[in-house]
Image: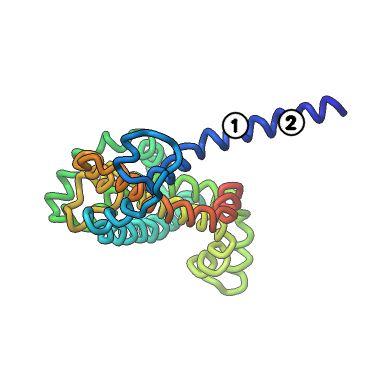
Amino acid sequence: MKRDLSYTFTAYLVLFVLIVFNLSPIIYMIILSFKPNAEILRGGFLPEQPTLEGFISVFTRWHMAQNFVNSLIIASLTCIIAILAGIFGAYLLGRLNFPGKFIFVIAIIVGFSYPSAAILVSVYINLTALGLYGSYIGQVIAICSYELPYVIWILKDFFTRLPKNIEEAAMVDGCTHLGAFLRVVLPISRPAIGAIAVLSFLSGWRNFMFTSILSTPKTMPVAPKLYHMIVLGLNDYSGMMAATLLGSIPTILIYVALQKYVVAGLRS
């Protein structure tokens, strides 16, 4: 009995320390976003005179409303394209046999085995040559070129584990192969697809590597804009923290709201 209590206490203590360790930067960011710049420079923990000047600066001095719209557009397009291309690519690799399948599988493995910085120059040159530099679709293509192998690999594993008799039964009832896929396989795959949709959206929202070199001031999303604020911030620490907080809120809300689908999809 004492051993069980000791184990439980230790487990909760470790979890508490981990939670504090992970949440402390977020808590400090929230506190700084409500402190005036002069007060931040003086030090101290809690704000003596809480203010919204940091949040006002985000939209008046840095004009970030358009950046949030840009991030929403890029993240939504990334999610849609990654899901559509990933579903069909994963289904082909996971359920069908065709010549050259092994080569495609190796290509997928190679696709997520190198860092995104390794293809940065080639992606920039190719998209610029196609006239897509500074466009939303150019940034989405760059992000999907790196994220799609992960999407295909995760969904491929899910499709491979599904029993093949579910499609055979649907085809016996009159469905074509495509009809069996759309009417039977896809509904069963909703947990996995939902998890991938959330992860793809978050990846598009927070991407910095590609968007920082492929965007213009008009199409720049939040992540590279935050970097510009750090470089050109001119001691606007409150504005930086407020912008970071606002940029984090959508990802936190989406993950919290859809957490059960993410967990269910990854478990499946």
Q: Percent from the top left, x then y, of residue 172?
A: 61, 69
Q: Is mark 2 on a helix, strand or loop?
A: helix
Task: Determine crowd level at label 2: few under 14, some 14-19, many 20+ residues with C-alpha closer than 10 A.
Answer: few
Cα–Cα span, label 1 and label 2: 12 Å
Regarding residue 100, the answer to whether it shows in the image is no
Q: Which amino acid, by three-letter code, is at mark 2?
A: Phe
Of residue 30 and residue 195, the one placed in the foreground of this image is 30
Q: Which amino acid, by three-letter code, is at mark 1?
A: Val
Question: Mark on residue 127?
Answer: none
Q: Which residue is found at the position 56% from the left and 48% from the top?
A: 266
Q: Percent from the top left, x then y, of residue 186?
A: 53, 63
Q: Is residue 101 left or right of residue 23?
A: left
The quadrant in which the N terminus is found is top right
User: Which residue matches tag 1?
Assistant: 17
Q: Which residue is found at the position 82% from the left and 25% from the top?
A: 3
Q: Quadrant of residue 61?
A: bottom left
Of residue 71 and residue 142, the one placed in the foreground of this image is 71
User: Which residue matches tag 2?
Assistant: 9
Regarding residue 229, the answer to whether it shows in the image is yes
